[in-house]
Amino acid sequence: MHPKRRTLALALPATLAALMGAAPAAPAAPAAPATPASGPAAADADRHGPKPTIVLVHGAFADASSWSGTIRRLQRAGYPVLAPANPLRGLAADTAYLRSVLAAVEGPVVLVGHSYGGAVISGAALGDSRVKALVYIAAFTPDKGESAAELAAKFPGSTLGDTVNPRSYPLPGGGTGTELVIERATFHRQFAADVSTADAAVMAATQRPVATAALEEKAGEAAWKTIPSWSLIATADKNIPPAAERWMARRAGSHITEVDASHAVAVSRPAAVTDVILDAVRATR
């Protein structure tokens, strides 16, 4: 075994080596709420009540710019959009942060999560009557007591464990934690095979690491049990096995769409992602 692989195997639990993932980020401007719609868009809002704010939550090894293509399309359709930074430090902490973001949003909300971001929205929406729909994009849809790492290992097919390296980072209260980064040499084929080489190189360079604790932490109660959900399955995903995505979506009773795309489907197929989000919006207004 290559020394680097041996170090990884010793450093991480067996379930983590099968692994989880999230769509890497693509270069683009940060998200901002759309300007108020006029004309037909405004008339639509008057007929059906206020348009929901669509909140897009990225996952590991990414940032909010991975939603850029989707954001542009949603804003052109007249919807307010937010794409906050997901801290990627712990499921409970990340969920609490997203709740703080939602507290500043007025009116109805549609929550969208990619990969590990799916676990975050599942917790953040719990008990919030303003959240009208949950949308999972190549995402984890955990039930209480499940972690992203164990769900990724539930079905064969993930090759992410062979492409990540652990490194230490300081914890706020002292001591060190472990976070994961993806090897740049394997980033393109592993995470974004259907993205251009140039864009994948930028995504690899700007990746945000995820704490192993976030991927191992068990979820609390699941909001998808009481809020309608939609799921996009990326059938060429090498990070979360498509079979796992499909199993979780069926268990949640989600409206399912399958797309031939890599785990970076929000980057490579933003039109398909937007269509699923708008399906959810229209069905819940």
Image (cartoon, rainbow, N blue to C red):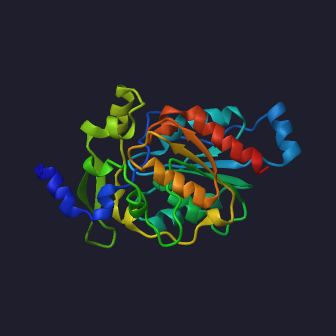
- The answer, for residue 171, to whether it is visible in the render is yes
Q: How many marks?
A: 0
Q: Residue furthest right?
A: 47
- The answer, for residue 85, to whether it is visible in the render is no
Q: Is residue 43 above or below residue 1?
A: above
Left or right: 267 as drawn, with respect to 11: right
Coordinates of residue 97 in the picture (x, y in percent): 52, 62
Picture quarter containing residue 73? top right
Image point (67%, 69%), residue name = 127
Of residue 158 and residue 212, the one placed in the foreground of this image is: 158
Coordinates of residue 145 in the picture (x, y in percent): 48, 73
Left or right: 155 as drawn, with respect to 73: left
Coordinates of residue 227 in the picture (x, y in percent): 68, 61
Image point (57%, 55%), residue name = 249
Image point (32%, 56%), residue name = 18
Q: Is residue 100 above or below residue 197?
A: below
Image point (32%, 60%), residue name = 16
Left or right: 256 as drawn, with respect to 269: right
Coordinates of residue 3 in the picture (x, y in percent): 11, 52
